[in-house]
Structure formats: C-alpha cells, structure tokens
C-alpha cells in the first residue's frame, strides 16, 4: 500500500478518504521518507522548502484548499514537484459566504443575536442597521470566486464594480483602474484577490478612508491583503462602519484587538467549510493521488 505523508493536520474527512487506499502518516513518523512520492497538506499549513528537502523523491503535493501562498512554489518548481490544489471545489461556497457576510455585517445579525441572548431586548432599543438593497458592491479580484460573487450580488439587484490589474472586457461590470477609486464608489468592498507580493497590505489607511464612514469591508481572500493595524484603527475611529473577516494576517492567532470591536464579524476561515465542499475536496485529492500511483504502476 503506497504511503502519503501529511505535512500538518488535515481534515478528518480527507484523512479517512485517503486511508481507504493509502497509508497516511505525519512526515515526522515516516519510516522511509526517502521513498515518499506524495505529500498532503492544507492551504493553512503549506509546505516549506525544508519539508520538501526531507523527501528527495517527492513528486506531488496535494493541497486541501485554494491558497498556495504558504507553499514554497519556487522550490517545488525547481524540483519539478507538481502542486495540486482544490481551487475549483471551494468557489461556490466561498461566493455564498461573501453574501452571508454582507447581510451579517450591514444588518448586524451577530450583534442582534448577542443582544437577545444577553436579555437586552425589551430593556433598551436595538440600534438601527443599514439597508442592503441599493448598495454598490466593489469587488477586488475577478477570478473564479470574484466572478461568482459578482453574479450573486447582481442577482440581489445590487450594482457591482471591480478592480483588477487589467480590465476584463467580458466581465460586463464597471471597471476601476485604482482600488481607491473603487472604494470611494462602493458601499461594500469585497476582497477576492489572491495573496501575492502585489496584493500584500493592499487595503490600508488610504483605501479605508476612501471607503468611508458608511462603508463595509468584507475579506474572503487572504489576511495579508489587509493592513490589520490600519483596519483596527479605522474600525475603532469610525473611519469605516463595519468589517466582516474570514481571514487574518496571523491566523489562527487573531489579533486580540479585533475581538474588542463591536463593528467587526470574525469568522474562522470558514467560507468553504461545508460538508459538501469537504467531501468534494477529499474526492479530488484522493483521485489525484490514485492517478499518480496508477501511472507509476502502468508507466
């Protein structure tokens, strides 16, 4: 039975699926790491050059998730190691989650829940929220997820604009050359871009100032896209109205200051965590592993 090493914790559903046909063990417990051809990881864990160096015959890295920013892609490319992720599997649920966060942030759903649980209803008035209908939504990044978010928002009757490094003529949406221009135009700024050197801390004080005191920031991309110190200051000083964050700069160690702010929703990188997506991701990775070993047997 072929062996696959896991480079860090993986979801139980994925581990069970892989164990149906393969031995799965942590890299530290591999009896013969020099013989290992396949490793499995997650977008949260990644794969370092040091880990790859421990596996001289490594040919395939299976990544549970879409993000590849924690995988040393340069090292993988230099060693001709294939990196296979599950980007297509997470698209639908991540786009759906953006809509959920939009309503939760503007209508203050989580705050309303806490208000009732704390027994405040009937003792004081709940602060009015802001209407979703009629909102302008700006999307940063128009890949598969961003495109689907745009479709979801248009389906709600909302006006949508976007910013990417270059316009996409087929998008049929209002294009903004600069992210500050998009932020100034929209009521809700949704981050759907990948983590790259170009997007590192892309959203800082200037963008937040442009978004303004009635604006809402939603981040379903990567925590590195936002300058968290600037965001915390903006939320605390009323520079923007609210934020809904599914990703963070140092997750899972979230900056404790965020938890003290009443106008931010904190989510544990859960946009794609559904039973259906987890099953699909596990199936994709299992199938790719099976194809690798089958090719080795028949090649």
Image: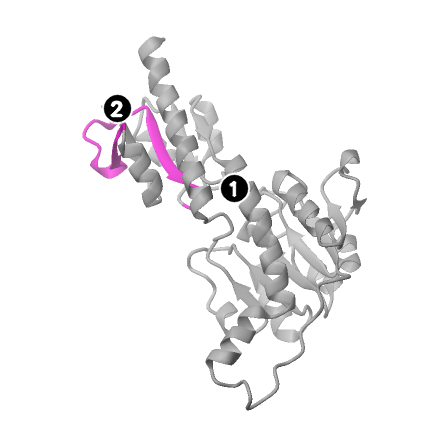
Which quadrant is the C terminus positioned in? top left
Image side of residue 173 versus residue 290, left or right: right
Q: Is residue 174 above or below residue 242?
A: above
Give the residue at x 47% y 25%: 77
Q: Residues within 10 Å of mark 1 (few under 14, many from 20)?
A: many
* Disc marking residue 248: none
Residue under label 2: 2
Q: Toward the viewer: 3 or 254?
A: 3
Q: Toward the viewer: 277 or 291?
A: 277
Residue under label 1: 90
Image side of residue 105 versus residue 13, left or right: right
Q: Is residue 198 above or below residue 131?
A: above
Residue 186 appears in the figure: yes
Name the secondary structure under disc 1. helix
Q: Residues within 10 Å of mark 2 (few under 14, many from 20)?
A: some
Q: Is residue 174 above or below residue 121?
A: above
Residue 142, x across and y down, in percent:
68, 41
């Amino acid at each position: 039975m072929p062996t696959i090493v896991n480079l860090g914790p993986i979801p139980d559903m994925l581990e069970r699926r892989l164990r149906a046909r393969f031995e799965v063990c942590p890299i530290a417990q591999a009896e013969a790491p020099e013989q290992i051809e396949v490793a499995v990881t997650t977008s949260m864990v990644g794969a370092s050059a040091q880990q790859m160096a421990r596996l001289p015959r490594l040919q395939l890295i299976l990544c549970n998730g879409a993000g590849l920013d924690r995988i040393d892609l340069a090292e993988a490319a230099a060693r001709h190691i294939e990196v296979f992720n599950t980007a297509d599997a997470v698209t639908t649920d991540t786009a759906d989650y953006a809509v959920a966060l939009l309503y939760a942030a503007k209508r203050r759903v989580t705050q309303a829940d806490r208000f009732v649980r704390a027994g405040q209803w009937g003792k004081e008035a709940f602060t009015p929220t802001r209407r979703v209908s009629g909102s302008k939504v700006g999307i940063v990044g128009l890949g598969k997820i961003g495109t689907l978010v745009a479709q979801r928002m248009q389906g709600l009757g909302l006006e949508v604009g976007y910013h990417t490094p270059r316009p996409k003529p087929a998008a049929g949406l209002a294009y903004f050359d600069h992210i500050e221009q998009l932020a100034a135009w929209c009521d809700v700024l949704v981050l759907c871009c990948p983590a790259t050197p170009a997007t590192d801390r892309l959203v800082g004080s200037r963008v937040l100032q442009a978004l303004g005191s009635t604006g809402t920031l939603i981040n379903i991309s990567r925590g590195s896209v936002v300058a968290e110190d600037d965001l915390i200051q903006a939320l605390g000083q009323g520079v923007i109205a609210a934020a809904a964050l599914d990703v963070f700069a140092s997750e899972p160690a979230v900056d404790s200051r965020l938890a003290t702010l009443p106008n931010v929703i904190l989510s544990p990188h859960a946009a794609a965590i559904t039973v259906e997506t987890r099953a699909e991701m596990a199936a994709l990775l299992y199938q790719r592993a099976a194809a690798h070993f089958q090719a080795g047997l028949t090649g």
